[in-house]
Amino acid sequence: MNKALLQRYRAGGFHSVQGWGINETLFDIFVHLNDFHMTNNLEGPLCEIGVHHGRTLILLGLMKRQHEKAVGIDLFESGQAQNLDASGKGSIEAARRNLAEHAPGVNFDLIAASSFDLTTDQRNLMQGCRFMHIDGGHFTEVVLNDIALTQSVLGLGGIIVVDDYWHSGFPEVQEAVHRYFWTSPSLKAVPFMTGINKIFLAHLSHRDLLLAHMSARLPEERRKPIRLLGHSAICIDPH
């Protein structure tokens, strides 16, 4: 983890990168989650589906250890015919420029493809994933595929963050999350936290420890106890 570059990006650098996915509060929450992995010696790739111009992927790259991978998947310009809900319209050239500016010296694997069409080698880049941010297509079938893909490559103690879970303009994201949980015969990761438009899932191996970790670090107004999909969790929206 490059602390100097991370602090510079937090101080305002990420505002210059066009896109969504993180704000100041989410930035700090992602770092708290990463600290949990560091403290517990949990390793693996940090990945994102739906890179756009790299705003969140840069943060993931700055959080990784030198030997870990940072993997970003997006349709980018060449695949916009498959972008059926017209979300994002990412640019691989803009992403590369932003990665070079805000995370110099950090290696990224950018994959210009649909998450439905990944090769075995591309999937292997994500094997043992410890952090996945899902912010790709918003149709039910797409989100279901991205969650299933992530659950299949998730490593011990891994975290999945699904964006737009509460977005009224993309209701199929929440529908897909719920459908997956009610129909999947096996689950590696279940909810432990939600809020700021996202749902956070944690590998069953460390879910309770991670919930306690975050509860101890968030202010009282951002850790309201709730039940979510049958699991104890906290809501990080102010209460």
Image (cartoon, helix red, strand yellow):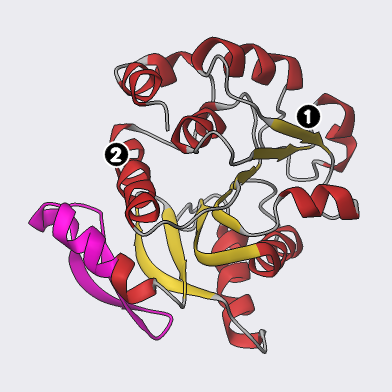
Question: Helix, strand or loop at disc 1?
Answer: loop
- Residue at the image position 17 percent from the left and 53 percent from the top: 217
Q: Earlier in the sequence, mark 1 or mark 2?
A: 2
Q: Identify the residue at the far left of this view.
A: 220
- Whether residue 231 is in magenta: the answer is yes
Q: Is residue 37 left or right of residue 177?
A: left
Q: Picture quarter containing residue 225? A: bottom left
Q: Distance between the residues labelled 1 and 2?
A: 28 Å
- Whether residue 61 is in magenta: the answer is no
* Range of residues picked out in magenta: 211-239
Residue 28: mark in rendering = 2
Q: Can residue 103 be seen in this view?
A: yes
- Residue at the image position 87 percent from the left and 49 percent from the top: 121
- Residue at the image position 35 percent from the left and 49 percent from the top: 196
Location of residue 146 in the rendering, given as x and y in whole percent from the top left corner? 70, 59
Question: Helix, strand or loop at disc 2?
Answer: helix
Q: Picture quarter containing residue 236? A: bottom left
